[in-house]
Amino acid sequence: MYASRDEPGSLYPLIAERVEYPDDNRWIRFVINPKARFADGSPINAEVIRDTFLQYKNGDFSNFKHLLKDVDQIKIEPGNRVKLTLNTPEDKKLPFRLAQLPVIHNSYWQQSRGDDHTIHIPVSSGAYSIRQYELGKSVFLERNKHYWAEKLPVNIGRNNFEQIKLEYFRNSTLSLEAFLAGQYDIRVENLAKNWTYAYKGKDIDTGKIIKKNYPRKSFQVQSFIFNSRKDLFQDQRVREAISQGYDAAWTNANLLYGIYSVPGSLFAGTEFAQTGIPDKAEVKLLEPYRNILPERLFKQSWTGLKTDGTGNIRKQLSYANRLLKQAGWELKNGKRVNKETGEPLKFELMLAVPEQERVAIPFKSNLKILGIDMQIVSVDVSQYVRRVRNQDYDMLLRTFHQPDLPGNEQREYWSSSSANEQSTQNLAGVNHPAVDAMIEHIIKAESIDQLQAATRALDRILLWENYTIPQLYHRYWRVAHRHRYNYPENEGLYGPIDLSIWWEEEPK
């Protein structure tokens, strides 16, 4: 099914002609559209749907496998139908997530069996097919002229390009130079420095390239993430002390040109963000875990490191020094060492984007005053992915992509059940009973009020336990494009920027 971009929580028919489910939410039945076809003309039928779900449930797809663990049975029924029996009927969002999983042609599973590491192009079930690719450089997509769902309501006005080429570059500098030189047409800019200073040249001056702040409704928070599986970071006091070294206000003003907002939540900019002291509904959820939660959580709002933006954070570093002493780390000859073992307090911040080093260097300098040695290491994407999958890192700088309505994806982000899985999305290695409980309350919420209370309570725990250091978020997508491209005017859509609704104007 297709998720509406302006109605969070609404799905519309695509491959499933309709969907059936009972009031108690114990199963969901997809009635497959008899016209549904893959790009090669073969039918997308109930058997294909069942096999796709079974591969996700039993195969090596860690994210999907985690989602499908709450699916008890998957079986075909007469009339081209697939019925999934659910173990957790109280999880109101599970059927929505199942309905949005991609459908894969059976030939793909047959080609990818065993130790075969060959890259196989899957047969598309969508509007475009991969016609060719150059590994690490580009992917060429071509629109299927016989796409069976072209005239379904969900596709009207979408998929307007005959051909799409996706190009990959080794770094942002090369990518921007190629864009300004006319090698590609649409660019989403992630770096504030580039957006502020680097878009120059004739095409910019003459309006052939247009810069646009494209509004969005889903906010993503970029954060430094502690790997709390590491012995060094298992003590909350150490994590909080290190957090005192990151001056978000100074960084935003001096290195990021004031473009960003400093987040006070991992759900910043949404109705699910913690603010003020917990209300009665939140306290009711948190109370059973009071003895294992910071008392401050119940008495005040988490605000992060508050500074005046001048770079003078002596007060904050003094507080960090006290925390480190309490945790058994003392200062000797300018180095922070463990009182019992003599081991120095040092760790590595691993980056996949070298340009991010400039925001990490002041952080490193502040920590050096505390005697902490933070090494900044930039690695290529393949090494970064491999090390993240193997949990071989101390700290990362990553963005949390939260959905429009929080649900069972929070298990993947924070649950103890996912903390030690390979390729887990629980990057911080969170293993906390109160966190697990709040996630279950999120999943079982039966109203928006209950969902807000549970998500805000989860937000508070994660923030006060200092699993991350929220760095920044932005209310717009920064998009640059050739003037011949256009898109519908709107007040912002949920989710990522949707290029499927763009089109190319006829030459004048």
Image (cartoon, rainbow, N blue to C red):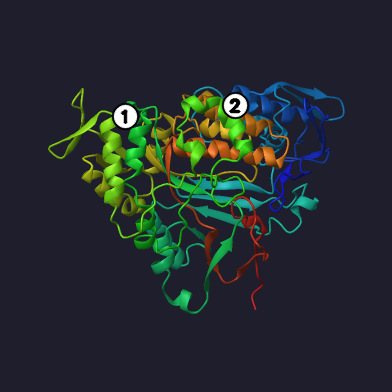
Relative depth, front residue between 259 and 130? 259
Residue type indicated by callout 2: Lys
Residue labelled with disc 2: 65
Q: x%, y% of residue 149?
A: 77, 48
Front tag of 2 and 1? 1
Q: Local crowd at mark 1 within 10 Å, few (<14), some, or many (≥20)?
A: some
Task: Give the quadrant of the C terminus.
Answer: bottom right
Residue at the image point whose x is 66% and y is 58% from the top: 162
Q: Identify the secondary structure beneath mark 1.
A: helix
318 relative position to 187: left or right: left
State whether residue 356 appears in this view. Answer: yes
Q: Which mark is residue 232?
A: 1
State whether residue 454 appears in this view. Answer: no
Q: Are marks 2 and 1 in contact (CB under 8 Å)?
A: no
Q: x%, y% of residue 168?
A: 46, 51
Residue type indicated by callout 1: Leu
Q: x%, y% of residue 288?
A: 56, 25
Q: Local crowd at mark 2 within 10 Å, few (<14), some, or many (≥20)?
A: some
Residue at the image point whose x is 64% and y is 37% from the top: 281
Separation of residues labelled 2 and 1 (CA atoms):
31 Å
Relative depth, front residue between 467 and 17? 467
224 relative position to 76: left or right: left
Q: x%, y% of residue 292?
A: 47, 26
